[in-house]
Image (cartoon, rainbow, N blue to C red):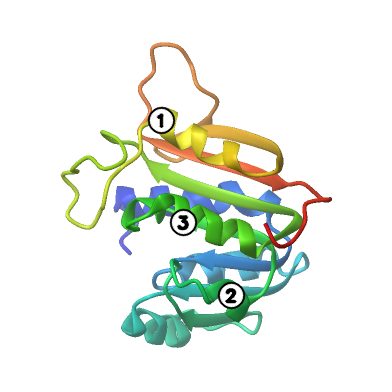
Amino acid sequence: MKPTNGMLLEHIARYYFAEPYIQGRVLDIACGSGYGCHMVAKDRKREVTELVGVDNDPETIAYANVEYNHQKVKYIQGDALDPELPERLGLFDTILSFETIEHVADDLVFMDQLYRMLKPGGTLVLSSPFGRGRGMQTSEPFHVHQLTAEEFESLFARYAFDDVEIYYQRGVTFEKPRDGVRYFIGVAVCRKRKDEVLDR
């Protein structure tokens, strides 16, 4: 948590980037130690009714409950690919998923899970680092694989989103793609159609 930790600054920047889209009942999937949940609950206290932080590690959840406790935040242990998770957690107006999809065995099942938990009219903000592609080895020991930029952008075509905006993160800044610039992290802001049937 040192202020000179560049990776930490990038993570915090993603929460700041997402804040204008955050409202209502919020899910932060793979919330980690909880600093992002706490930050959002404080900064968006008027817009957020409840924030649920989910992580699969019990020690991390125990830490979050102590260090980043907030009256609007509830931390829950859970597996993002658990088919019972949507029924257990219910529906959300906003879902945040930062640097998670590269850690799961099946990114498409993961996306299905998020879509099931997102209310019609709700917003998903999801980020992922880029790499060699689905099914390809990565140098990161905890990453199953890292999608290419093209695979990342195509993730959202399977769903009834009214609008998908793709941004690219460079350090703590976010921008639309520019010719000749190589990007390492993509961020998508997806708005679910209001008339979408809940059981897809």
Q: Residue at x 59, y 36 (%)?
A: 157
Placement of 179 over or under 148, stated as above or below: above
Name the amino acid, label 1. Answer: Ala
Residue closest to the eye, 129 or 7: 129
Query: CA separation, marks 3 and 2?
Result: 20 Å
Picture coordinates of residue 54, whole percent (x, y): 48, 74
Which residue bears the numbered disc 1? 149
Residue 109 numbered mark, or none:
3
SS for dot 2: strand
Q: Earlier in the sequence, mark 3 or mark 2?
A: 2
**Please, what is the three-letter code of the amino acid marked with disc 2?**
Val
Q: Determine crowd level at label 3: few under 14, some 14-19, many 20+ residues with C-alpha closer than 10 A.
A: some
The Cα atoms of the two marked residues, 1 and 2, are separated by 29 Å
Q: Tell me the residue at 58%/75% (across/down).
A: 52
Query: Which amino acid is tagged 3?
Result: Val
Question: Where's residue 141, x and y in %?
Answer: 17, 55
